Image (spheres, rainbow, N blue to C red):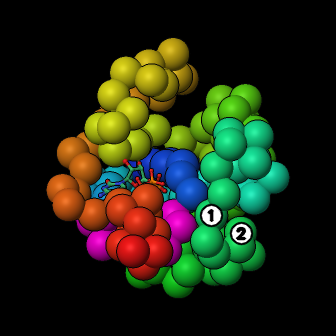
Amino acid sequence: MSSALTTAITYGTYDLFHIGHVNLFRRIKERWDRLIVAVSTDEFNALKGKQSAVPFADRIELVRACRYVDLAIPETCWEQKADDIRRHQVQAFVMGDDWLGKFDELKALCEVVYLPRTEGVSSSELKQYIRA
Ligand code: CTP
C-alpha cells in the first residue's frame, strides 16, 4: 500500500548536538512530512578518520529526542543510502550545502536537496572552543 505522506532522509554524525543540526531538521520538516535521520556509528566514523566526543548510543538518542525526527537509524557504511531510500520509500535525500553535489548520483532514486548550513556553528568549532 502506498502512502501519501512524503519522507526525507539525512545523514550525519551529530556530535555535540547543536543549533545547526536542529535548524536543518526543522527546515526539512517544513517541506516533507516525515524525517529519517541516519546517525554515523563510531566504527563508521573511524573508517572516515573521524572521532566524536559523544558515543554513538548517546548521539542517536539525542537525535531521536528532537521533535522533528520521526525515525533515527544507524549509518554503518557509504553504500547503505540507496538501500535506505528504497526500503523507507524516501522522496528526498537532504544534506547541508557543505556536501553540495557530493550525492548527486542518488538523483536516480529520489530528489537530492542541499540546504544552506547554519553559519557560525559546527561540532569541530565547538570542540576547538572547549579545548582552548
Ligand atoms: N549542518 C548544518 N549547519 C551547521 C552544521 C551542520 O546544516 N552549522 C548540517 C550538515 O551540513 C550535515 C548535518 O548538519 O548535513 C550533519 O553535520 P555534522 O557533520 O554532523 O555536523 P558539523 O557541525 O558540520 O560537524 P563537523 O564540524 O565535525 O563537520
Element type at marker 2? helix
Q: CA distance from mark 1 to mark 2?
A: 8 Å
| Of the pair 20 and 108, the residue shown nearer to us | 20
Q: Could you tell me if residue 54 is visible in this image? A: yes
Q: Could you tell me if residue 107 is visible in this image? A: no
| Of the pair 47 and 112, the residue shown nearer to us | 47
* Residue matched to label 1: 52
Residue occupying image coordinates x 75% and y 59%: 42
Identity of the residue furthest to the right in this view? 43
Residue type pointed to by label 2: Phe
Q: Is residue 25 left or right of residue 35?
A: left
* Residue matched to label 2: 56
Residue 38 painted magenta: no
With respect to residue 89, does 5 lie above or below?
A: below
Horizontal and vertical percent position of residue 75: 70, 50
Task: Name which quarter of the figure residue 5 lies in.
Answer: bottom left
Q: Is residue 63 left or right of residue 115?
A: right
Name the quarter showing ligand 1: bottom left
With respect to residue 64, does 92 lie above or below?
A: above
With respect to residue 91, does 43 lie above or below?
A: below
With respect to residue 14, does 49 lie above or below?
A: above
Horizontal and vertical percent position of residue 11: 54, 49
* Contact? badges 1 and 2 (CB < 8 Å): yes
Q: Residues within 10 Å of mark 1 (few under 14, many from 20)?
A: some
Residue type pointed to by label 1: Ser
Task: Name which quarter of the figure residue 119 lies in.
Answer: bottom left
Q: Which residues are magenta?
A: 14-23
Q: Is mark 1 within 8 Å of ligand 1?
A: no
